[in-house]
Image: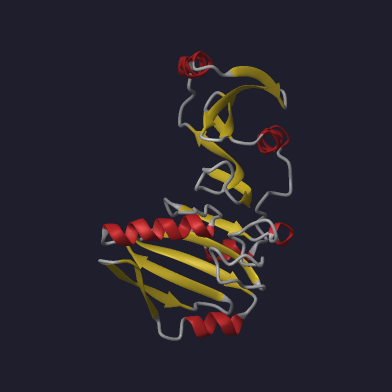
Amino acid sequence: MQGSRHFREPQGGSEVMEFEGCSILVFEKDLGTLANTIEQAVIKSGARSEMIGGTRVLVIQEKSEESVWTNFLAIPRPNVLLVANNRQYLLEVLARMAQQKSPRALPEQLPEWRFLDTSARFWGLRHYDPTQAKLDPTSPLGEDRTFDPGDPKAIGVLFALDPKNEQSLVITSLTGDEAKARAYVRSGKAVAEPQEGVRYEVKLRNPKPGALEQIYTLDRSSTLDYSILAIEFALGRGMYF
């Protein structure tokens, strides 16, 4: 799983937007001696060791074009591996693990949870933060229209594979503008033609006031590829080609 926030325009000649985040791998069994093998291999590659939040962390720096990328690797529990790209974000993850800090980053009161079946093998959600709107090109709350047509009443977005049919992917957008959601789904479908030779239909539904569902049928590689791209944009991973 991964958590992320504070999405920003690319820096240093990169095409991919910057963000703060942490990937969390939870293994069924303890890593045992493999944990030491991983750490030694990372150290040999040039990483240094330091303590962050009471946990030993390996700091890895890599130069790419005009930028220096810093990543942090930690094994805070015998079966948990963390890889973060921001020190403060990692510190907060470690603090939450140690203290069971509350409230949750995405608390259960958020309306997005009502549209999600967590038995899905692949899912994710984003709740828009109005305090970040001016700095985040992917936020529909801001004035930048690079990735989103804009919606000052946008609430959040989530996606999930249908647990009963994993060839069906649903992306649900929530908004306080109920009329806008109804109008968008009036035709019941949208035709996407992202490039020459690629064409597919996305079914549209308005299951509840303020909810817009886009349903992708993943029966072709092109539909899968562009649905993944749509998810990345929705979650703040815009790319400047």
In the image, is 234 to the left or to the right of 5?
Answer: left
Residue occupying the point 45% across, 77% down = 205
In the image, is 40 to the left or to the right of 162?
Answer: right
Residue occupying the point 67% across, 73% down = 152
Residue 183, position in %: x, y?
A: 51, 85
Q: Quadrant of residue 227?
A: bottom left
Between residue 211 and residue 135, name the one nearer to us.
Answer: 135
Q: Quadrant of the C terminus?
A: bottom left
Residue 9, position in %: x, y?
A: 60, 51
Residue occupying the point 73% across, 41% down = 101
The colour mode here is secondary structure
Residue 148's place in the image compared with 105, above or below, is below
Q: Quadrant of residue 187?
A: bottom left
Between residue 223 and residue 193, name the one nearer to us.
Answer: 193
Residue 170's place in the image compared with 225, above or below, is below
Q: Quadrant of residue 199?
A: bottom left
| Residue 118 visible somewhere in the drawing | no
Residue 77's place in the image compared with 153, above or below, is above
Residue 46, position in %: x, y?
A: 54, 17
Residue 224, position in %: x, y?
A: 33, 58
| Residue 207 visible somewhere in the drawing | yes
Residue occupying the point 58% across, 67% down = 145
What is the tally of numbered marks visible in this picture? 0
